[in-house]
Amino acid sequence: MSAAVVPLLEARGLVKRFGHVTALAGADFDLLPGEISAIIGDNGAGKSTLIKALSGALQPDAGEIRLDGERTTFRSPRDARLVGIETVYQDLAVAPALDIAANVFLGRERRRGGPIGRLFRLLDKRAMRRDAERHFEELGIRVQSMAVAVESLSGGQRQGVAVARASAWARRLVIMDEPTAALGVKETGQVLDLIRRVRDRGLPVILISHDMPHVFDLADRIHIMRLGRRVAVVTPQSHTMAEAVAIMTGATQGELERAMTKDPTS
Amino acid sequence: MSATTEPTATDPAPRRARVLDAAQRVLGAQAVAPLIALVLTAAFFSVKSDAFLHAQNFSLILQQVMVVGVLAVGQTLVILTAGIDLSVGTVMAFGQIVMTKLAVANGVPPLLAIALGILACMAFGLLNGALVAGIRLPAFIVTLGTFNIALALTHAYSSDLTYSNLPSELLFFGRTFRVAGADFTYGVVLMLVIYAVAWYLLTQTAWGRHVYAVGDNPEAARLTGVSVGRVLLSVYVSAGLCVGIAAMLLAARTELGDPNAGQTTENLDSITAVVLGGTSLFGGRGSVLGTLVGAVIVGVFRNGLTLVGVEVIYQYLVTGVLIILAVSIDQLVRRRRV
């Protein structure tokens, strides 16, 4: 790993407590330019708390977050969004009755120029449709028309809309929180391809997933969390899935070594 | 891989196209259905009664529709956010008592009295909106509460007196002008203007999209940066404005300030108009132009049933059946789509 590269996003010693429960106990994280960094961990390992801290959905009790090497705090998802961090959620966060272009531009609608836009707040629907269409083409998402209601799309296409929206607005990075959890096998494959294309266009991705094969298929680096800490950073080349799971579930060092020595023989 | 999963996996394109076609057909029908219902209703009554199919009768229907029509604009906004406003009738009565009492009994300049009456209605809208958006109470309970509060305030403030001899400013929107052998009130014109403005706001501005998005999937709206609370608040205050304007039209039409107005038919009629117009009670889909058609359907029913000689009691019965029918269709269409 090249130590010279400044991480795009870096977290150091994040702590978050909920009453007696310590969700994050000094967690670290770093995302390098142009990579897909996956976060894995058992239930309760602190994955989602870490992600919420990185996306501004909650504030850590201690620790710091650095963006391009500079210290920042996110008091709300809006703060994170303002600096160019977008999040894709697992539960298909789209408005089904609105059309695709309206969903891509939801909350960031574009108005006509001049007094018509300023005084009468008239939407520039044509420009929004055109830009949404161009963006979909760049990502290779195929849909009939931008004027189609999202509810008439398949689950995979709907998540495609969410990914396209996030990557259209993210200037720095995209966080994908279990983006395929609600999808079928084939649709999952489509969304995974899409995530890869987002990365290939230069936008780094933080991927949270339960699915080991997907993580090992997609990620450049894998951060393994356990009991509120990042216990290891591995790559699909350096470790097998079994080893990653062993670290994740807290197998002892001895067990780990046995697993490692056993693997080549099998 | 079992054999049953493979057909869908091999050729998704035709299946997708079929789903799209179906959706478009349903959505298209949703916009057209209220109009067809209106034509059928009108055809039925013109066969049943000779008096129905006259220009003068149509202008009468429009005059009867105008108050409920304006209430239904506000109701549409609220229902699009998956809420409901049960308070429109009595809040309207309160606004109308405020403007008439101030103008007649207290000598307040009529235009100021009208403005204060409208503001009173908007204050109720603000209260509804603050409770729904701020404390996240169900709109149903909140507006049932404000229904009773407005009812009590109306009677207390008016001392159960009826105010007549209204100044001419308060009667303006009840005045008529002649077009093509029929009389139209300025109030009907105002109603149509309000529909046009509401249509523009809902379909051509970001605010309108946010209203739909909040009703459709509030969580998604919030996550994409829409300020859900602010949208809800603006919707309920706008509904209050519509109620205030309806109060002004009611005073102009009845030429009275009547504390007993607005307690019976207006609430249900405004909801019926919205639902008949194809707007879903589950929020997020519908159109204000559909509501206009729905309001006219309600008006045609009341007018036609009167002409045919059906007693008022049975008119209630028919409206009751009508709204349940419309909601059932909404639910069936929705189920098929999901």
Image: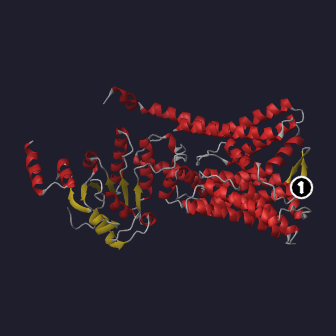
Quarter of image, res A33: bottom left
Q: Is residue A136 left or right of residue A19?
A: right
Q: Residue at x 76, y 54 (%)?
A: B193
Q: Residue at x 67, y 43 (%)?
A: B275
The residue closer to the viewer here, B133 or B43, is: B133
Residue at (28% x, 62% y) in the render: A32
User: How far from the left and from the top, in percent, is residue B15?
Assistant: 46, 31
Q: Position of residue A5 (x, y in %)?
A: 25, 66
Quarter the C terminus of chain A occupies: top left
Along the line of sight, which residue is nearer the eye, A67 or B292?
Answer: B292
The x and y percentages for residue A185 are 34, 39
Expressed as whole percent of the image width and height from the top left, the position of residue B176 reads 90, 53
Can residue A20 be seen from the camera position used here?
yes
- Count of residue discs: 1
Where is residue B182, by image quadrant?
top right
* Crowd band around label 1 with a 10 angstrom C-alpha radius: few (<14), some (14–19), many (20+): some
Q: Is residue B281 left or right of residue A263?
A: right
Q: Is residue B288 rendered to the left or right of residue B51?
A: left
Q: Check disc 1 and give the amino acid type.
A: Arg
Which residue corresponds to the image point at 44% horizontal and 48% vertical from the top-left?
A: A92
| In this view, A249 is above or below B7 | below
Residue highlighted by disc 1: B175
Describe the element under mark 1 as helix, strand or loop: loop
> In front: B211, or B147?
B147
A2 and B90: which is toward the camera: B90
Q: Quadrant of the N terminus of chain A?
A: bottom left
On the picture, is B162 further left or further right than B238? right
